[in-house]
Amino acid sequence: MTAGRLTVVGVGPGRPDWCLPAVTERLLAATDLVGYGPYLDLVPHRVGGRRHPSDNRMEAERAQAALELAARGADVVVVSSGDPGVFAMASAVIEVLDEGGRDHAGVEVEVLPGITAAQALASRVGAPLGHDFCVISLSDVLKPWAVIERRLDAAAGADFVLALYNPISRHRPWQLGRAIEVVRRHRSAATPVAVGRQVGRPDESVGVVALADLEPASVDMSTVLVVGSSTTRVVADRPLGSSLYTPRRYGA
Amino acid sequence: MTAGRLTVVGVGPGRPDWCLPAVTERLLAATDLVGYGPYLDLVPHRVGGRRHPSDNRMEAERAQAALELAARGADVVVVSSGDPGVFAMASAVIEVLDEGGRDHAGVEVEVLPGITAAQALASRVGAPLGHDFCVISLSDVLKPWAVIERRLDAAAGADFVLALYNPISRHRPWQLGRAIEVVRRHRSAATPVAVGRQVGRPDESVGVVALADLEPASVDMSTVLVVGSSTTRVVADRPLGSSLYTPRRYGA
């Protein structure tokens, strides 16, 4: 039996016209699509492969199942939203390869990138990621909170723009509030923060608020945040889409 | 006279099938395309708008010229490679809006995202950006070197993966070597580094080397680097495309 192939793709934030043609081509060719149910629902209906939806937080099992399908000869696509390489399935799949030794040696594995949430949000408000920035997940499910706090403190202290993923969930209610406290050690109350919920979806909601006015209770698990650096500016009298930017020039 | 519109787009790293359909649609509709010459050359020939190529390092003048065209009623697209929001033209355009007061108040300005170099490189080697990371430009043309060094030290000290843009140029020959020294305070000699030159172009060249073996002389201005964190791993016996990843889990 000839082993098949596995491609890990990101369909972007959800709009079909923000998904790479290379990804669409792989989706159309696949025999099997594996992914968290709501992400599979982002794949157009004309894509005909068998769909294997799974629950969230089952990344390792999902990666294992996808590799086994491919090892039996299938042409498998693992579907993430956003970019599969950023807090998503690409790392989970390669971790299974790493732990499995020669188990999947014959399976050809490829990753295709996608537009990740921070880019989607940034484009909706202007150019807040126009200068050095960090991308941090606030989820302490897979890493200790102390590591997150140390990173927030280091990145805010060095005046990076901060893109914050997974800011809150039912099981992680206090982490965002604590993160704001850490950032406030280094940033003024007026620091602009872009807040995007369901960016790129029909029910998208995007805004810019001052750091001191950011209410954790207004944020949910489908929200991403971009916290400005000391140089990030709000442009007076511009519509939201060209209102926020971080200048290319810094300091003297 | 009715003011026109201006859209800042990124065509991604250069492959047509890595460019968003939303971007292609705007390119096809535009009356005028403005950009650094080599980036305009990435736009397919079937795109018919007037092309206004400019030199590199003329971002402010290019942004000003594009806004003036749009103010006179044109449908202008400003073309970047990669993501226009990441060290590219979106920030330059909005800065001109900010400085120009009401000059361009009637011009509708929109930004569309694209695949940036770090994502493209990451996807070619696996998933090195699978955990918290920073994106830093090593160019000290628009910011003091001391700021860059402080950021490298902070980010490496807090164990972020580091994506390094603009690592070297004829006029900036020593900065990458110095950056490696700063990172080496915090990282072992064996830390894997992904090195990508012209990623997504016909003459793409991608590899993974140990931090201690990274030769600045082998790097040029069309190269991007991703330096692993302490947990980034190389998978034994895998082809390059699925060989490097940063696990989702960190620490205890």
Image (spheres, coloured by chain):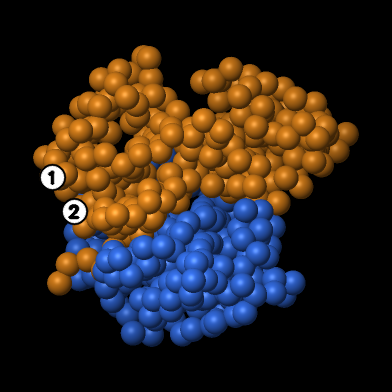
Chain colours: A blue, B orange
Q: Nearer the viewer, residue A173 or A39?
A: A39
Examine the rendered structure and indicate whether residue A145 appears above or below residue A249.
Answer: below
Instruction: Describe residue B196's horizontal placement relative to residue A76 as left or right.
Output: left
Q: Which residue is drawn at 66% across and 28% down?
A: B40
Asked if marks 2 and 1 fall on the same chain, the answer is yes
Q: Where is residue A100 in the image (x, y as percent from the top left)?
A: 29, 70
Picture quadrant of residue A12: bottom right
Question: Does the rendering let one see residue B87?
Answer: yes
- Residue that carries the numbered disc 1 in the rendered image: B188
Q: Position of residue A177 (x, y in %)?
A: 31, 71
How many other residues sit within 10 Å of disc 2, few (<14), some (14-19) or many (≥20)?
some
The answer to which of marks 2 and 1 sits earlier in the sequence is 1
Q: Which residue is drawn at 52% across and 75% down?
A: A34
Q: Disc 2 versus disc 1: distance between alpha carbons?
A: 8 Å
Q: Nearer the viewer, residue A17 or A235?
A: A17
Instruction: Describe residue B84's horizontal placement relative to residue B28 as left or right.
Output: left
Q: Is mark 1 on a helix, strand or loop?
A: loop
- Residue that carries the numbered disc 2 in the rendered image: B230
Q: Where is residue A8 in the image (x, y as percent from the top left)?
A: 49, 63
Picture quadrant of residue B150: top left
Q: Position of residue A184 (x, y in %)?
A: 28, 58
Q: Which chain carries label 1?
A: B
How many other residues sit within 10 Å of disc 1, few (<14), some (14-19) or many (≥20)?
some
Q: Which residue is drawn at 43% across and 67% down?
A: A89
Instruction: Describe residue B13's horizontal placement relative to residue A190 as left or right.
Output: right
Q: Residue at x 49, y 71 (%)?
A: A1
Question: Does the rendering let one see residue B70?
Answer: no
Q: Which amino acid does label 1 sit on?
A: Ser
Q: Tags 2 and 1 in contact by the CB under 8 Å rule?
A: yes
Picture quadrant of residue B224: top left
Examine the rendered structure and indicate whether residue A199 appears above or below residue B118.
Answer: below
